Image (spheres, rainbow, N blue to C red):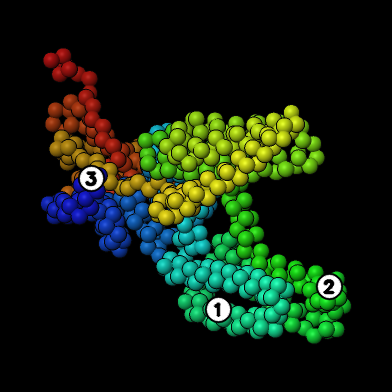
C-alpha cells in the first residue's frame, strides 16, 4: 500500500498487524512510515519509539526513529544519535550511512555528507539515494530554507515567517527607493519641478518608515535573526542592501535639498565637482543615487554569478547519470546542465569581450569552451528539455561565429556571435518565466531536490521453530564477541522471547567488550538428534542482568555424520 501511494490503507494494515502480533517491531515501523507519509510526525515518532522499545538492538528500528525525529523541531540531536547507533549496529549496511550523510547535507556540511555517501556506495554501488545526494553534495546544495538550521529548537515555520518579512521589506525598500530616485531626477532635471520632487522624496521616506514598522511586527523570532543572517549570507546581503539603499536615498535627498554653499558631507567642499548651475549634483550625489538605483540589480547579478560557479557540476552529473532510473536524478541532471550552461556562457562572454579589445585572434579559444557542456549533454541525454537544447546550440553557434570574426576578420561573425550570446540569455529568461508561471522546476539551483526514499521498512529477522527449539532445549550455548585482542568465546545460557530476541546470561568479562562493540554471534546445537547447528548474529544490549540480542542474521547448517548418506 505504501508503494502504491495509499498511506491511509497502509496505516490500517500496519495497525492490524500490530494488533495481531503486539511484539512485532516491524508492524510499528510500518505504522511510523505510514504516519510520516501522511504528515503526522508526532505519531510517526511515537510508533518508531515503540518499535525501538520492542527491539532496541534493531538497526532498522533505530533508522526509522532517526528518520522520523529529524522532522520535529528541537529533536535533531536525538535523530543524529539514533542514526549513529544504526550505523554502529550495522556498519555493513548502506542505509545507515546514507541517513547520517543526509543529516549532514541538510545542515550544509557538504564534506561530511560526501564522505558518508561514498561509504554507502562502497557497500552498494547501486544505491540510488546515495548517488543522487552525493551529486548534491558535490554541487554544494543548500536546502530551500537555508536560513534555518535543523538542529535549532525553534519551529522552522517561525523562522520562515521572519525570513519572509525580511525579504519582503528588502524588496519593497529597494524597489521603492530605485523608482523614487529615477522619478525625482526626471522631475527635477527634465520637467524642472525640483521642489515638488523633493517633497515627494520626503514622502517616500515616511512611507518607508511605515513599511519598516509593518514588516518588523511580522518578525516574531527576533532573537534568531542574527543567526539566520549568519547562516544564509544572501539573506544577510539582501537586508544589508536594503539598509544601504535607504541610507543612500536619504543622503541623496539631503545633498539635493541642501542650500548653496553648505557642505553636507564633512571634509568635502560644498558643490565640489558639480556644475555651476547645479551645485548639489556632485560625484557624491551621483554615487549615492547609483547605490539607491543599482544596488539591488548588482546584488542579484553577483548572486547569480556566485551560484553558477559553486560546486562541481561535471562530477555531480556523473553520479546523476548512474541513477538514471530515479526521477529525482533526471530532474537534478537537467538543472545541473543549466548551471553548466550558465558557467559556459560566463566564460565565453568575458573571453570574447577581452579578445575584442586586446587581440581579436584570441577568440579562436572560444571554440573549445562549450566542449564540457556538450559532452555532459551527450552523456546525460539532455534532449528532454528542448529549451536547454536550443540554448546549448546557440552557445555553440556564438562561440564559432566569434572565433570566425576574430580569427578571419569577418564582421558578420562578430555580429552573429554577439546576437547568439544575447539569444542564450533570452532563452534562459523565457525558460525561467515558463517555469515560474507553471510552478515547475526552473533552470536554477533552487530547483535541485534531495532524494528521500522511505527507510526502516525492512522486515525483521524471524527465528524459525527449529531455531527456537534449538535455543530452548540446548544443553550448551556459546557466545562469540570481539575485544581489543580479537574474537572471544564464552559459555552462556540463552532463552527466546516472544518477540524473537535472545536473552543471554554470560560471564562478566564479556559485558565490557560488548558495550564497546555490541555485535555478537550466539551458537547452539540441535539438542535432540544433534544433526544441525544454529548461529544467530545480532546486536547485544544490556537489559538488567541479561544481554538482549536482536537478530540480524540466522544461519543453520548440518554437522557431518552418517545421516548425510541417506
Residue where numbered disc 1 is placed: 212
Looking at the image, which residue sits at the far front? 191
Looking at the image, is mark 1 or mark 3 nearer the viewer?
Answer: 1
Residue where numbered disc 2 is placed: 274
Distance between mark 1 and mark 3 Cα atoms: 49 Å
| Residue 98 at x, y percent in the picture | 42, 44
Tell me the element at label 2.
Answer: loop
Residue that appears at 42% across and 43% down = 331
| Residue 27 at x, y percent in the picture | 21, 50
The quadrant in which residue 371 appears is top right
| Residue 440 at x, y percent in the picture | 40, 51
Residue that appears at 19% across and 18% down = 561
The quadrant in which residue 361 appears is top right
Distance between mark 1 and mark 2 Cα atoms: 34 Å
Can residue 546 be seen from the camera position used here?
no
Answer with left or right where residue 408 lies relative to residue 320.
right
Considering only order in the chain, which callout, 3 or 1, is on the residue closer to the N terminus?
3
Residue where numbered disc 3 is placed: 4
Looking at the image, is mark 3 or mark 2 nearer the viewer?
Answer: 2
Amino acid at each position: 500500500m505504501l508503494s502504491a501511494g495509499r498511506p491511509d490503507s497502509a496505516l490500517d494494515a500496519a495497525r492490524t498487524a500490530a494488533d495481531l502480533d503486539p511484539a512485532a517491531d516491524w508492524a510499528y515501523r510500518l505504522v511510523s512510515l505510514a504516519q510520516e507519509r501522511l504528515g503526522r510526525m508526532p505519531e510517526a515518532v511515537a510508533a518508531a519509539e515503540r518499535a525501538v522499545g520492542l527491539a532496541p538492538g534493531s538497526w532498522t528500528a533505530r533508522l526509522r526513529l532517526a528518520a522520523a525525529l529529524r522532522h520535529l523541531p528541537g529533536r535533531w540531536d536525538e535523530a543524529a544519535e539514533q542514526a549513529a547507533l544504526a550505523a554502529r549496529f550495522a556498519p555493513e549496511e548502506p542505509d545507515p550511512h546514507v541517513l547520517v550523510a543526509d543529516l549532514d547535507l541538510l545542515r550544509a556540511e557538504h564534506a561530511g555528507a560526501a564522505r558518508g555517501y561514498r561509504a554507502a556506495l562502497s557497500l552498494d554501488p547501486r544505491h540510488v539515494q546515495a548517488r543522487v545526494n552525493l551529486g548534491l553534495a558535490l554541487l554544494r546544495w543548500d536546502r530551500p530554507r537555508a536560513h534555518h538550521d535543523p538542529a535549532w529548537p525553534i519551529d522552522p515555520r517561525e523562522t520562515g515567517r521572519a525570513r519572509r518579512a525580511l525579504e519582503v521589506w528588502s524588496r519593497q525598500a529597494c524597489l521603492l527607493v530605485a523608482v523614487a530616485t529615477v522619478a525625482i531626477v526626471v522631475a527635477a532635471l527634465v520637467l524642472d519641478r525640483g521642489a515638488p520632487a523633493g517633497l515627494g522624496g520626503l514622502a517616500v521616506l515616511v512611507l518607508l518608515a511605515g513599511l519598516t514598522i509593518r514588516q518588523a511586527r511580522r518578525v516574531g523570532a527576533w532573537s534568531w535573526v542574527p543567526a539566520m543572517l549568519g547562516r544564509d549570507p544572501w539573506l544577510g546581503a539582501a537586508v544589508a542592501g536594503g539598509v544601504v539603499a535607504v541610507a543612500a536615498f536619504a543622503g541623496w535627498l539631503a545633498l539635493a535639498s541642501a542650500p548653496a554653499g553648505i557642505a553636507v558631507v564633512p571634509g568635502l567642499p560644498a558643490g565640489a565637482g558639480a556644475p555651476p548651475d547645479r551645485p548639489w549634483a556632485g560625484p557624491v550625489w551621483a554615487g549615492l543615487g547609483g547605490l539607491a538605483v543599482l544596488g539591488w540589480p548588482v546584488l542579484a547579478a553577483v548572486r547569480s554569478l556566485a551560484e553558477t560557479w559553486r560546486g562541481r557540476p561535471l562530477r555531480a552529473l556523473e553520479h546523476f547519470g548512474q541513477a538514471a532510473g530515479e526521477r529525482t536524478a533526471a530532474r537534478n541532471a537537467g538543472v545541473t546542465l543549466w548551471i553548466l550552461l550558465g558557467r559556459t556562457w560566463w566564460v565565453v562572454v568575458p573571453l570574447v569581450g577581452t579578445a575584442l579589445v586586446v587581440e581579436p585572434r584570441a577568440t579562436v579559444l572560444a571554440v573549445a569552451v562549450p566542449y564540457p557542456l556538450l559532452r555532459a549533454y551527450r552523456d546525460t541525454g539532455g534532449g528532454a528539455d528542448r529549451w536547454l537544447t536550443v540554448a546549448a546550440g546557440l552557445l555553440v553557434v556564438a562561440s564559432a561565429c566569434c572565433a570566425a570574426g576574430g580569427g578571419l576578420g569577418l564582421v558578420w561573425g562578430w555580429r552573429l556571435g554577439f546576437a547568439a550570446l544575447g539569444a542564450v540569455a533570452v532563452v534562459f529568461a523565457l525558460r525561467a518565466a515558463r517555469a515560474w508561471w507553471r510552478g515547475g522546476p526552473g533552470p536554477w539551483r533552487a530547483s535541485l531536490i534531495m532524494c528521500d526514499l522511505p527507510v526502516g521498512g525492512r522486515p525483521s529477522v524471524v527465528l524459525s521453530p527449529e531455531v527456537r527449539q534449538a535455543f530452548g532445549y540446548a544443553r550448551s550455548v556459546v557466545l562469540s564477541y570481539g575485544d581489543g585482542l580479537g574474537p572471544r568465546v564464552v559459555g552462556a545460557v540463552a532463552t527466546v522471547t516472544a518477540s524473537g530476541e535472545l536473552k543471554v546470561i554470560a560471564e562478566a568479562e564479556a559485558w565490557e567488550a560488548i558495550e564497546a562493540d555490541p555485535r555478537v554471534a550466539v551458537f547452539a546445537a540441535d539438542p535432540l538428534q544433534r544433526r544441525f547447528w544454529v548461529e544467530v548474529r545480532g546486536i547485544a544490549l544490556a537489559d538488567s542482568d541479561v544481554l538482549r540480542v536482536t537478530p540480524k542474521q540466522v544461519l543453520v547448517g548440518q554437522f557431518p555424520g552418517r545421516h548425510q548418506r541417506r
